[in-house]
Amino acid sequence: MNFDFSEDQKNIQEQARGMLAKECSSATVRRVIDKGEYYDNALWRQIVQLGWPATTIAEEHGGLGLSYLELCVIATELGRSLAPTPFIASVYLSTELIKTAASSQQQAEWLPSLACGDVISTVAVNGSPRDCLVKNMQISGNKSAVLHGMIANQVIVSATNERDELGLYLVNLGDSGVSRKVQNSLDPSLPRAELSFSNANVVALGGDISAEKALSVVFDRAAVLLAFEQVGGCEATIEMAKAYTSDRYAFGRQVASFQAIKHKLADMFVAKELAKSNAYYGAWALSADAPELALAAATARVSAIDAYYLCSKENIQAHGGMGFTWEFDCHLYYRRAQALSTLLGGNPYWKSLLVDRLLAA
Amino acid sequence: MNFDFSEDQKNIQEQARGMLAKECSSATVRRVIDKGEYYDNALWRQIVQLGWPATTIAEEHGGLGLSYLELCVIATELGRSLAPTPFIASVYLSTELIKTAASSQQQAEWLPSLACGDVISTVAVNGSPRDCLVKNMQISGNKSAVLHGMIANQVIVSATNERDELGLYLVNLGDSGVSRKVQNSLDPSLPRAELSFSNANVVALGGDISAEKALSVVFDRAAVLLAFEQVGGCEATIEMAKAYTSDRYAFGRQVASFQAIKHKLADMFVAKELAKSNAYYGAWALSADAPELALAAATARVSAIDAYYLCSKENIQAHGGMGFTWEFDCHLYYRRAQALSTLLGGNPYWKSLLVDRLLAA
Amino acid sequence: MDFKDSPEQAEFRAEIRCWLQSNARAKSASGGRKDQSEAYEDAKAWYKKVADAGYACLNWPKQYGGAGLTDIHKVIWSQEVSNYDEPDAYFVIGIGNCGPALMHFATEEQKQHLLPPMASAETVWCQMFSEPSAGSDVAGLRTTAVADGDKWLINGQKIWTSGAQHSDYGVILCRTDPTISKYRGMTMFFIDMRQAGVEVKPIKQMDGGSHFNEVFFNNAVIPDAYRLGDVGGGWGAALLVLMNERLAIAGVQPDGFPEFLSLVKTLHIDGEPISANPAVREHLAEWYYKHAGIKASTNRMLTAVAKGGMPGAEAALGKLVGAVMNQDIANYAIQLMGDTGSISEPEFAQQQAHFQKTVLFSPGIRLAGGTDEVMRNVIAEQVLGLPQEPRADKGLAFNEIPSGNQSR
Amino acid sequence: MDFKDSPEQAEFRAEIRCWLQSNARAKSASGGRKDQSEAYEDAKAWYKKVADAGYACLNWPKQYGGAGLTDIHKVIWSQEVSNYDEPDAYFVIGIGNCGPALMHFATEEQKQHLLPPMASAETVWCQMFSEPSAGSDVAGLRTTAVADGDKWLINGQKIWTSGAQHSDYGVILCRTDPTISKYRGMTMFFIDMRQAGVEVKPIKQMDGGSHFNEVFFNNAVIPDAYRLGDVGGGWGAALLVLMNERLAIAGVQPDGFPEFLSLVKTLHIDGEPISANPAVREHLAEWYYKHAGIKASTNRMLTAVAKGGMPGAEAALGKLVGAVMNQDIANYAIQLMGDTGSISEPEFAQQQAHFQKTVLFSPGIRLAGGTDEVMRNVIAEQVLGLPQEPRADKGLAFNEIPSGNQSR
């Protein structure tokens, strides 16, 4: 048994952390939020240069052909630094959906531009299957809460066709039949959009897999990757809470020396550590493409959602009044915790999935 | 508004507390448990002499004709002292069921001996309606977990008749068609029995109310009365935890001065105080026979179950290792919390009732 | 045990019910959220109208702008006015906290001069206790008042001052002697918020709002006549002010339950009403008994007050329980909504994005007026009588107390 | 990242798997609960059999009765033996705690004399640290050892000693100097449990069992040769012992999940399988991720140990999370059963009354080996590096430390 990342993977993580510490301070995140810029383009260019979006894309398609484990360590650091980029939408979701549900020819055509970051892609797969209808290879309808929908070049939409079958369709967001509108959300550093389609042209994803199955597979992968982002966020909040309460004095002693604060931080640590260990197991299952993945992914996701909510809210509490100010970074993590937890269907939905899988195991 | 008990009621409570402090120390409870005596007869005689079982029975039937409020304050003290008597079975449940579901003639016949304590009565109304069948006014079948079934003189059983209708029947436990067997349970000071009926003679309760409705009414009343017993128990555990942790020193200071212990006790107090306030509202609804009773009773019950579980388990924890010994009284309260919470259907059942009533309100 | 009014109370209730009917705005008439200065003007107008009718500060003596009635009349008023859409609690901190401070410590002349316009909100007051380095440890404050003849020179900074930007006057707690024990070296004053040397800066909150302010004092000069109580008596005066706050706050604290109940009654997921889902129902039951328990606890406290008691530290439980559940309810509601849960557009999200707004505002409620941890300390020490922690600042002069890197 | 054995580990696993198949009892063959002395004899027989086959104390040196292998071999052994119904962890405290103490502090002669029979459980050991007035504050212990020539005179009382009634020897921590700081005035010894002046009294637990004992010392005399480590070095020695305990305990802690999962799979209420009830499912999901998280955390720790690390204080989290959920699961299961939930007859209640027994036993698990509060302190201080609380006993001689009414 070797239930840990390799030295190489840890090196990648160290480098990622170093780069992000330099290029993605909270000032970067705040700039995106304050200016309504949707993402930090300079940071995204850096990330592209380092080849992160290409991590799990096969070398034949211009990727690095690495395993999901490398993506997991990168995810941790993106989560820790609250990186305001379309990485989740484009890499975890859209790239994976294309790898899973597109035909070989489509993959060969589309993946290289995702690998090199020329194209930013997203997905619009939530809501009802009948939100969008495809007729004669043209789509009409609306999708809400589309991650980075304002800046993506293309989107994969789940939609129903004339025969009432669910399918996945690629839509170019430059198409004249598409309009988009930003939707204010709890975390403006992961902005959402409403997409409206009116007879926009589509390409059907042509792989040998049903849309339902493809979405399920990709959601499981994304659940593990998001869990690492959430664990990274948890670690950041614990560090913040420790630093602030150690520096601050009340009643003549460090706030961190009060048992109520120590035990609060211990509870945050415990939740984070359970989430981290569950994420590790998910990473193993993901990298080994093991049958355990379905249960492991749901477990990692639920554990990480609970941990990040706890850590981000109690970090505010540990900061006292200052934690409630816009000026302090506490709320950026709290907002991110909300944004990540609602993705892919929210906590109750994933708890129910977990139990389905546990009882079937 | 006068949301408190009257001075007279508080006096009754003071007297009850005084009597029970004297006559029902934990030694009394332990004697019943250790000797497998099912109840403390001397204490029961005292309670009978003070007229407590007669509290809400009409004067015309040999009762005191007082309100439920007087019974609520008595319940608090019985709960505080863990009184090992058949009060719950005979007074809250059986007497109330007779008052609710028996004919006037039956009430006139049965209530006086309940009021004066000559008869101890219980109920066997849990489980499936088809556990017991009545044919030609004879009953056959089994009932489990019957409170004080070993020492009661009579029992009211819910059973199905030849036409598959649910009914309530009085059975004399001296009948040759009845056998009883003690069932070990978490709280031997409120012992349970399995009753087996084999063509035992019954009398059908003859009031103008369906069995279902009668049980629902009586359960609601009992829910409020039990909530006061539970609140009394909570208060006892908080006092114990305070006394022990104040006396005991660790690291050169009172254990009660550690914030983890202080906050634990604060949480116990908060849960108890919510339960107490909800019980007060239940008491008001009960005494006023207000339409609010259904929701108030479920609220009081759920709140009290949660509070007593918390208080009784954290009292053990606050006592450290000694809390886990047989010698200390902590476990007596913890056992009682379990016994009271499982009566009338348990916590999930009552939560669901609460919500039904809340949504209908 | 009953919920009936006494005949006199019933008569009073009927009277104000009648007055409110013709003078207060109905709930349905609500014009939605107002911006801050609009809301402020609106509240001033309402208070003035109430004062003109003789219903301002019902439990204050008549000569100070009140009606000479009891706390219970005030409770009846609050109950009745809660059926209308009027900003009746808008100036609760000024009137509820600063009022009693003046009542207790000001000269008769000052009281007659200052209290009536406070009662009618013609002058608005704020309370300045907290400081950047004195949060839960209020007595750790560092704003100095230095005597200069019959004047005092104020320097330092206050924070978390509600409504400072709209206030005419403020009550302020200052350190007047840093060389003695921290509790004995404080003095209370009031100050003109418009005077030289006083600067108010709104704080931008994490939810984007600016309810609170920083207030900076830079050689602000006040006469000794503005002193409230003895030199060195500030802590006792502050405790008296905070004690009065309890009744004002009791039962006002939002706990988020009514909105959650509405959500449960209306929301469907995958075509199923969530009210049929046992997991949702379990949460509903737990939050309901807490909600009902807080309400019933408040009624027990009001009964005690009506019988002449003081509101006890038990009031802390409503704040503790309500603030935590408010946050958890909002988070749970958003999780139920799934992918669209984080969308905070009022036209899009349930109940004008109530839950999304609450997610961002509720952390502040857990902090304002004492953190969860302070509430538990209050209950443990003041209600249960458990011993204080050993004090690291005990027996030390204020300027000898360890304070780490915090600026003094 | 993988769960594969190295070739050498795989070979070892195959070897013991083969041995166990012919020598260990299958789970289904379990004859139900044994009484205490029967269970003790049964465990001794099993340990002897294992020792004879050369598998005792795999990570100990061969000359001391071990197999000269690594911690990971021990883990592989534990994994494999867990598939059988054998009392393989029965003497874990003696071997896991007292063993390393001897290994570190005893003379070579003592080690060769004492350790092999300990490894084969021919002699049984117990550990005596806790005292009536020294629970969470272990270093507050008062049992004295007074030097008398080359002997020591032991007086006092220990408590919560697992297995004392079956033990031949015990490791004991005593106060040798009450006039200096409490941490520096302790010394560690071992003692013959059958000798004069030692009396063992079982403690009746709240669940009716008697796993733990009180041990009384009344002028028990031991030679100085039984001293483990330096005079005054007892606290350091004790910490070393407790550090070794972590690996032994990691992952052994019951958390109640497997039994709850079985219940959910089988129980019906009103004809409906409870596995379809969303409220039950929500609890199942939360407890599962904690259960899975503890297991995965243990695997991370074992990986670190295999790479040469020491098990960290992180192990406290498994104890904290597992003990609390074990109690809550049992309570919840009983509540689900309603009226009959409190019946504890094994023939009547689900799973031979597992949940009823657990309700009564689980409070002890939250206390034994450190309370929830101690676990949180350990995590806060040793893992997160947060500052200690100000110490009321700091700088004081042991006999000057405030101790209230507790007898010394």
Image: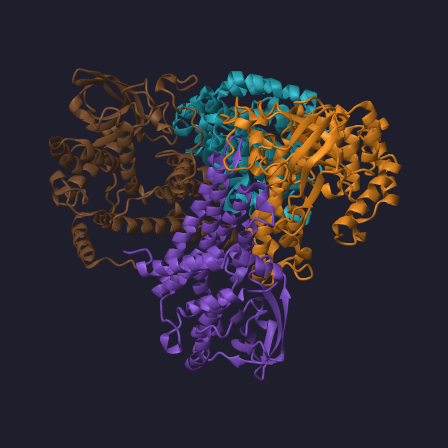
Chain colours: A purple, B cyan, C orange, D brown
Closer to us: A103 or C228: C228
**Residue D355: x %, y % from top left:** 41, 41
**Residue C52: x %, y % from top left:** 88, 37
Q: Residue at x 44, y 54 (%)?
A: A231
Name the quadrant containing residue C219: top right
Residue A5 horizontal side relative to residue C135, left or right? left
Name the quadrant containing residue B193: top left
Against C287, residue A229 (above or below) is below
Closer to us: A32 or A145: A32
Rendered-image quadrant of the N terminus of chain D: bottom left
Against C27, residue C125 (above or below) is above
- Count the marks: 0
Against C69, residue D379 (above or below) is below
Rendered-image quadrant of the C terminus of chain D: top left
Residue A68 horizontal side relative to residue C138, left or right? left
Q: Residue at x 25, y 50 (%)?
A: D306
**Residue B241: x %, y % from top left:** 49, 26
**Residue A27: x %, y % from top left:** 54, 56
Residue B221 at least partly seen: no
Query: Which residue extends farthest bottom?
Result: A136
Residue C217 at least partly seen: yes
